[in-house]
């Protein structure tokens, strides 16, 4: 594609060199550069793409896009290379990516789901309902990316970088999907990964204290403002009116037609007569002129909220009540209240709970139906919000019958230091606990001490198939580990 066509829609550009050259590939990682590439330098938290400009040129980049603050003298860019300067290379990357792949989100209906909790489950619910209604659906999110039942690959992050995202959209448009439902993280909104996306519908699940760190959001206000951006990008939105930020979203989004759903507060769609068991929830909602009984095989009050979000959208789209019920009843979401089947008939649950609020939800829910002890195995991720560590310790100490504090994804931090910070909270309670830093050994201890009336909750990692230590993602599938411990692995 001609370089100048890739630059359409980018404001405040300055350039030096030929803008009519043919570009064969766009890259923001120098490792992916081939001959006749446009290399766009992005400043990240750990790396600065401007330091790799010369490497990209050596590999064949014939054009480079740089931030206005770049030191051109230091780079010594050859005269035959086209140089483009812009105010924000992240925004520019998103727009270039849209142009390069032909703005593919115009060719299907795009649904974005944002919020601290519930994004993954809600997207799976929406996908299931739409498919029951006869539509072809793409999904992009924390676990994996799909076109129908075809897995396009497992995810490294909730929302891909804009170049990867637009390539996924291109594949989905080429496959003639009717809808794409995607998780939209606050980071993706803050870092302009979804700029240029043609959102048709937006959903807000809730806002809790999370993702506050040097590498994510400075404070809760910034965190909320990032999520709010989605509703300036779509004409129709669906918001949880039981969340304290609901009214602010409505007031700050005058150009978005916002519908509400709730359990406790007034809303356009209300759940009533809720029943929660150890294997499911069911409740009534009004669809059309009739009160319908909805059943979802994921226990917990939060499953009601996630279902309401999906139902609200489905009603707006005119989907039949029976299709909605079919889509929700047998939904399975990896790593969310996921029971690990085993020959010993032990209740072992894997859940992605990685905040104090989500851990409290899962522990409270399981305590209501577990006849024996609730045994919780959890840790906290490194290079993330440190304030939640003692809070999670306090929650597990207060609610679980026994806690094993272990390692999660320590990343670049010392796992034992993370555990000490968790212990500050749990030691203030009367809860029984022990520390086993090695996560496999911790899981082994939990399973060996349980009986058939107990439940073991492996919290924090959920769908993840790895454990990240010092920049390396080591294979770590808790399902396989459970099988190995119980002697069921072939």
Image: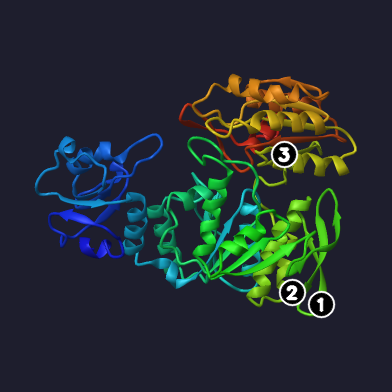
Q: Image quadrant of residue 448?
A: top right
Q: What residue would you read off at disc 3?
A: 359
Q: Could you tell me if residue 82 is visible in this image?
A: yes
Left or right, residue 365 beside residue 120: right
Kindly indicate whether the residue at mark 2 contacts the one at mark 1 (C-beta within 8 angstroms). yes
User: Regarding mark 1 in the picture, which secondary structure is present there?
Assistant: strand
Q: What residue would you read off at disc 1?
A: 290
Q: Which residue sits at x=34%, y=54%?
A: 93
Q: Which residue sits at x=11%, y=43%?
A: 78
User: Regarding mark 3 in the picture, which secondary structure is present there?
Assistant: helix
Q: In which quadrant is the C terminus drawn?
A: top right
Badge 2 crowding class, 10 Å Cα cut-off, few under 14, some 14 to 19, many 20 or more, is many
Q: Image quadrant of residue 389?
A: top right
Q: Nearer the viewer, residue 454 or 412?
A: 412
Q: Nearer the viewer, mark 3 or mark 2?
A: 3
Mark 1 vs 2, N-terminal side: 1
Q: Is residue 272 above or below residue 280?
A: below
Mark 3 vs 1, N-terminal side: 1
Badge 3 crowding class, 10 Å Cα cut-off, few under 14, some 14 to 19, many 20 or more, is many
Badge 1 crowding class, 10 Å Cα cut-off, few under 14, some 14 to 19, many 20 or more, is few
Q: Nearer the viewer, residue 331 or 386?
A: 386
Q: In which quadrant is the N terminus drawn?
A: bottom left
Q: Is residue 145 above or below residue 483?
A: below
Mark 3 and mark 2: Cα distance apart in space: 33 Å
Q: What residue would you read off at disc 2?
A: 321
Which percent across, then down, holds residue 225? 54, 52
Which percent across, then down, holds residue 94? 37, 56
């Amino acid at each position: 594609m001609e370089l100048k066509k890739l630059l359409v829609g980018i404001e405040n550009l300055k350039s030096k060199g030929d803008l009519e050259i043919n570009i064969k590939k766009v890259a923001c990682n120098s490792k992916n550069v081939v001959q006749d590439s446009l290399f766009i330098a992005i400043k990240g938290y750990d790396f600065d793409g401007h330091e790799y400009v010369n490497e990209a040129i050596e590999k064949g980049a014939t054009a480079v896009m740089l931030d206005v603050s770049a030191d051109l003298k230091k780079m010594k860019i050859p005269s035959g290379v086209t140089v483009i300067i812009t105010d924000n290379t992240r925004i520019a990357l998103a727009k270039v990516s849209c142009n390069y792949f032909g703005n593919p989100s115009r060719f299907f209906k795009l649904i974005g789901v944002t919020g601290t909790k519930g994004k993954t489950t809600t997207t799976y619910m929406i996908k299931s309902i739409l498919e029951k209604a006869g539509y072809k659906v793409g999904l992009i999110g924390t676990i994996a990316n799909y076109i129908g039942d075809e897995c396009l690959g497992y995810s490294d992050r909730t929302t891909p970088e804009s170049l990867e995202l637009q390539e996924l959209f291109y594949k989905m448009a080429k496959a003639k999907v009717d809808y794409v439902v995607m998780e939209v993280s606050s980071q993706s909104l803050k870092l302009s990964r979804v700029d240029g996306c043609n959102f048709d519908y937006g959903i807000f699940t809730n806002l809790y204290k999370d993702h506050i760190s040097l590498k994510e959001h400075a404070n809760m206000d910034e965190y909320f403002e990032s999520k709010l951006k989605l509703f300036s990008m779509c004409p129709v939105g669906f918001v949880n009116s039981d969340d304290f930020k609901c009214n602010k979203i409505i007031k700050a989004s005058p150009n978005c037609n916002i519908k509400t759903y709730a359990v406790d507060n007034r809303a356009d769609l209300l759940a009533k007569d809720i029943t929660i068991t150890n294997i499911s929830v069911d409740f009534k909602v009004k669809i059309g002129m009739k009160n319908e009984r909805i059943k979802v095989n994921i226990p917990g009050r939060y499953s009601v909220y996630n279902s309401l979000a999906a139902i609200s959208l489905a009603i707006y789209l005119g989907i039949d009540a029976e299709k909605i019920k079919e889509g929700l009843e047998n939904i399975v979401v990896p790593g969310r209240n996921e029971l690990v089947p085993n020959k010993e008939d032990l209740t072992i649950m894997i859940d992605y709970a990685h905040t104090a609020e989500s851990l409290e939800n899962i522990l409270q829910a399981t305590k209501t139906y577990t006849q024996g002890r609730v045994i919780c195995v959890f840790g906290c991720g490194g290079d993330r919000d440190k304030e939640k560590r003692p809070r999670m310790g306090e929650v597990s100490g207060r609610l679980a019958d026994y806690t094993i504090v272990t390692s999660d994804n320590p990343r670049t931090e010392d796992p034992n230091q993370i555990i000490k910070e968790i212990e500050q909270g749990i030691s203030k309670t009367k809860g029984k606990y022990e520390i086993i830093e090695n996560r496999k050994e911790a899981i082994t201890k939990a399973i060996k001490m349980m009986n058939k009336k107990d439940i073991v909750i492996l919290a924090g990692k959920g769908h993840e198939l790895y454990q990240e230590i010092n920049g390396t993602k080591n294979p770590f599938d808790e399902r396989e580990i459970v099988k190995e411990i119980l002697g069921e692995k072939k």
